[in-house]
Image (cartoon, grey):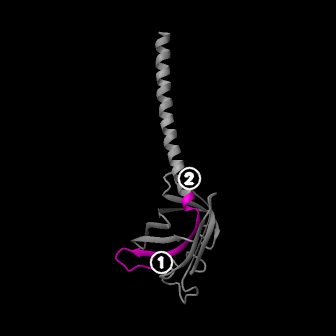
Amino acid sequence: MKNKFAAVAFIFGLVLGCSAWGQSATNSDSIDEASKTSKLLAGVWRLTRYVDTPDGAQPVYAFGERPIGQFIFTENGFFSINIMHNPPAPVSAAVDIDPDACVPGWYCSYFGTFRLSANGKQWIAHVVGGNIPAYVGTNQTRTFQLFGDRLVISETYEEGGRTVRSERVLERAR
């Protein structure tokens, strides 16, 4: 009876150990993927497109059709995002879907630390400072895809009862 109990305990422990090992490998794979993506994301990116398109409406180029912007990500988890209207001194920022978001409305900047989601397809930025008062002290999550030296951020959100598709396209600065 004692040997039977020991055999059952051994098999139970083996099953638990293998199960835990499998989970550990999966988590490790996720961490490896995020780490790999973090290294690919690190660097300076130049903004080439910033557009929001509400369902059934014309695209809105809040920072002009050729915005000026730079996103910087470091391998050790810091970021800085700067976007400004082109031309730099617009007569009116009234074309912005949310004109109160940045102060002033034609220039947005925020910075802090970031980490990647386990699957490496989103970054979670903890905003330390910037000129978007509603962002300071919050976490901002962005879904992105890397295509070599091209970074595409795309999301949908609701604004005024409409679904809006946003797209930000950046190219690695050389």
Badge count = 2
- Element type at mark 1: loop
In the displayed structure, 7 sits above or below 67; it is above
Instruction: Give me the residue at 48% from left, 57% from top.
Output: 121
Q: Which mark is residue 35?
A: 2
Q: Which quadrant of the view contains residue 90?
A: bottom right
* Residue at the extreme top: 1
C-alpha gap between disc 2 and disc 1: 35 Å
| Residue range highlighted in magenta | 39-61
Q: Which quadrant of the view contains residue 57?
A: bottom left
Q: Residues within 10 Å of mark 1 (few under 14, many from 20)?
A: some
Instruction: Give me the residue at 45% from left, 67% from top.
Output: 154
In the displayed structure, 76 sits above or below 104; it is above
In the displayed structure, 38 sits above or below 44; it is above
- For the residue marked with disc 1, what is the amino acid? Ile
* Residue at the extreme front: 174
Q: Which mark is residue 97?
A: 1
